[in-house]
């Protein structure tokens, strides 16, 4: 079979934006990323080991092609020296290892962060596609098509119901990391593009953005802010340091900040008037989205910032129905965006995998996320977790 990943552009935009920032500002950082499956698969992922090894060999043989570099270089926030770095970049097989323990599949990427951070999205896409090949039948594809058409119909109806004075309904594809297969994601994204002009505004998948004439969407992920927990700044100040480096790197571009590395309350304590004016908006990725959104709006009101000039992006386990409900709740008060992932790219009947490949250590130190959602905290160092909670005044889950 053809390799799962056939282009290094087949990844999420925020990988490139974080990569550029860390290459320019902290290129010496050493990092470790670990693969974790959070739910119970239908069969042991350990059975995929040999196929994953083969796919990683193929991934590490790829390089960026001239037309791909030209597409990246045309994005105004991508610097020419970073594009030149990508011109000579290749994944190094020595930096990633696969092993099994019983039924559990382990994948660990370890080395210079600017050489290993890019493994995350291809690894997740590889594991997903290999896993779902056993379920890929004409009947499953037919059910996926039925569900896809129902989503399009629901969004068309939702867009038609937007009232005067409400901000428009805008949806993005964030489904690469947990997609059923690469060709299925392409089909879904192309279908949305054709059927939902004005509603479907882009995709996080840079390759699909290039080939389907769409806007690539994305800013930062948890690993970016987590890295600053190990860069020598005072732990209490790591969010502010990360946001400041982002501002200096992008000078007004890519202005959506991720809020949930240590929880929304702790984030807002750092998101003062300076940052609130500089950033275009906030992204939700854990906790109750309505509670989160109300906190964001209250914070803007406290700072005397007109929320109509800002954007709230929701991206935590969204379905079309959830996106429409959130739009109805907030659309008359703030600009909105909805990044829908698994529900777009892997809704064909078989239960999706809940897999991640998260940054666990930087410069030999543990890093962590204190999620507002139970089960999303990922750190195997309880001492560091306790210290992080103490520093930010976050209560441990019961």
Image: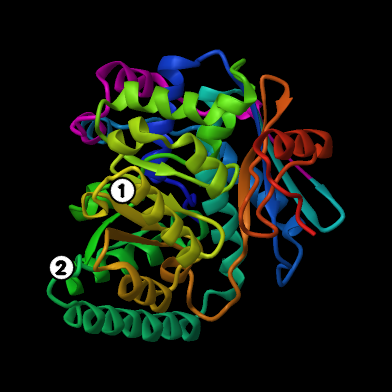
Marks 2 and 1: in contact by CB < 8 Å?
A: no
- Residue 364: x and y in percent read 72, 21
Residue 178's disc number: none
Image position of 130 (left or right of 150): right
Give me the residue at 34% from left, 26% from top: 247
Above or below, 372 against 350 in this view is: above
Does the magenta portion include 80? yes
Q: Earlier in the sequence, mark 1 or mark 2?
A: 2
Quarter of the image for the C terminus: give it.
bottom right
Does the magenta portion include 331? no
Q: CA distance from mark 1 to mark 2?
A: 16 Å
Above or below, 247 against 181 in this view is: above
Image position of 297 (left or right of 112): left
Image position of 38 (left or right of 204): right
- Residue 184: x and y in percent read 40, 67
Q: Which residue is mark 2?
A: 197
Instruction: Rate crowding at label 1 as few (under 14), some (14 to 19) or many (20 or more) other CA atoms within 10 Å.
Output: many
- Residue 344: x and y in percent read 41, 69
Residue 119 appears in the picture as rendered: yes
Of residue 368 and residue 166, the one placed in the foreground of this image is 166
Q: Which residue is mark 1?
A: 217
* Furthest residue toward left: 164
Q: Which stretch appears magenta?
A: 71-99
- Residue 37, image quadrant: bottom right
Of residue 266 and residue 326, the one placed in the foreground of this image is 266
Instruction: Rate crowding at label 2 as few (under 14), some (14 to 19) or many (20 or more) other CA atoms within 10 Å.
Output: few
- Residue 85, image quadrant: top left
Residue 92 appears in the picture as rendered: no
């Amino acid at each position: 079979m053809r390799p799962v990943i056939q282009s290094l552009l087949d990844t999420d935009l925020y990988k490139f934006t974080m990569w550029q920032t860390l290459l320019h500002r902290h290129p010496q950082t050493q990092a470790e990323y670990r693969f974790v499956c959070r739910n119970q698969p239908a069969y042991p992922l350990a059975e995929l080991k040999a196929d994953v090894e083969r796919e990683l060999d193929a991934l590490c043989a790829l390089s960026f092609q001239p037309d791909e570099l030209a597409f990246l270089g045309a994005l105004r926030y991508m610097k020419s020296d970073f594009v030149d770095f990508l011109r000579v970049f290749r994944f190094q097989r020595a930096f990633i290892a696969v092993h099994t323990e019983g039924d559990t599949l382990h994948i660990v990427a370890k080395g210079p962060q600017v050489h290993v951070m890019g493994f995350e999205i291809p690894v997740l896409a590889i594991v997903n596609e290999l896993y779902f090949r056993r379920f890929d039948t004409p009947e499953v594809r037919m059910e996926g098509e039925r569900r896809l058409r129902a989503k399009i119909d629901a969004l068309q109806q939702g867009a038609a119901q937007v009232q005067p004075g409400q901000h428009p309904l805008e949806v993005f594809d964030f489904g690469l990391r947990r997609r059923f297969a690469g060709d299925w994601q392409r089909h879904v994204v192309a279908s949305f593009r054709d059927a939902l002009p004005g509603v479907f505004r882009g995709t996080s998948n840079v390759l699909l953005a290039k080939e389907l004439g769409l806007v690539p969407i994305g800013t930062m992920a948890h690993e970016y802010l987590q890295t600053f927990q190990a860069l020598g700044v005072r732990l209490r100040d790591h969010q502010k340091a990360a946001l400041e480096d982002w501002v200096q790197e992008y000078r007004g571009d890519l202005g959506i900040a991720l809020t949930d590395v240590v929880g929304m309350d702790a984030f807002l304590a750092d998101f003062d008037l300076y940052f609130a004016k500089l950033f275009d908006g906030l992204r939700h990725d854990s906790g109750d989205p309505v509670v989160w959104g109300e906190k964001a709006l209250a914070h803007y009101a406290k700072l005397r910032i007109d929320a109509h000039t800002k954007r709230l992006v929701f991206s935590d386990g969204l379905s079309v129905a959830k996106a429409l409900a959130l739009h109805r709740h907030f659309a008359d008060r703030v600009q909105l965006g909805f990044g829908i992932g698994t529900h777009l790219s892997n809704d064909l009947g078989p239960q999706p995998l809940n897999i991640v490949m998260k940054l666990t250590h930087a410069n030999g130190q543990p890093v962590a996320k204190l999620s507002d959602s139970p089960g999303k905290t990922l750190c195997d160092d309880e001492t560091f977790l306790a210290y992080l909670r103490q520093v930010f005044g976050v209560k441990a889950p019961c």
